[in-house]
Image (cartoon, helix red, strand yellow):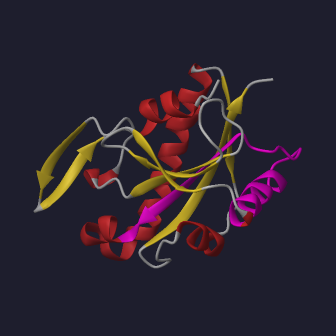
Amino acid sequence: MCPGEPFLYRTARVRATFPKDEKECSDRPYANGGACYELEFYIIVNRCENIPEGLYHYCPLDHQLCKISDKNSYLETLLKNAETATVPPCNPQILIILATRFPRVSWGYESMAYALTLKHVGVLYQTMYLVATAMNLAPCAIGGGNSDLFATATGCDYYAETSVGEFMLGSRA
């Protein structure tokens, strides 16, 4: 079974949208300062029933995974980096990479935007741990990451959207 899709629905989907200060804001299952929700979900599927291996972007408004690429050497390296960041080393079934879209948060918070983003990552991790535990999954936040490699693998502009957190998810043994 692949836990990814129900997990994403419970942690990251857009429940509603509304205008605020000439911007569109949203309501999601986790708390976020100013309702700007600058965090984006990129999912590397390594081993998951019914979902082919590769890199996906999660579209929270439509609750849909959009494929970016098949498994390649960049993704293999990101998975290997995640594996070696855990003790004991664990090859992830699913690696969720959280990326921030800086303009979404900087328009309202300017100089404290990066610090606020990291706080949002912590809040989201808490939600992800609670949901994974309730679903009897194996969650693990990772204290590493490679922003340059992420930008290369996704084709994202490093200065507009870059990785700020990683989270492994899998089935319990």
Q: Which residues are magenta?
A: 74-102
Residue 67 spot, x, y in % from top left: 50, 51
Taking depth in this image into account, of 8 and 140 the one nearest to the observer is 8
Q: Quadrant of the C terminus?
A: top right
Q: Residue 24 is drawn in which quadrant?
A: bottom left
139 over 149 or under it: above or below: above
Residue 108 spot, x, y in % from top left: 25, 67
Taking depth in this image into account, of 130 and 94 the one nearest to the observer is 94
Relative to 55, 10 lies left or right? left
Residue 20 spot, x, y in % from top left: 13, 55
Q: Residue at x 62, y 53 (%)?
A: 166
Relative to 43, 144 lies left or right? right
Let me know if residue 11 is in the magenta part: no
Q: Residue at x 45, y 63 (%)?
A: 100
Relative to 116, 150 lies left or right? right
144 over 41 or under it: above or below: below
Residue 146 spot, x, y in % from top left: 67, 68
Let me know if residue 87 is in the magenta part: yes
Q: Residue 85 is drawn in which quadrant?
A: bottom right
In the displayed image of the protein, which residue is found farthest to the right? 88
Relative to 130, 136 lies left or right? right
Q: Residue at x 53, y 49 (%)?
A: 122
Taking depth in this image into account, of 86 and 93 the one nearest to the observer is 93
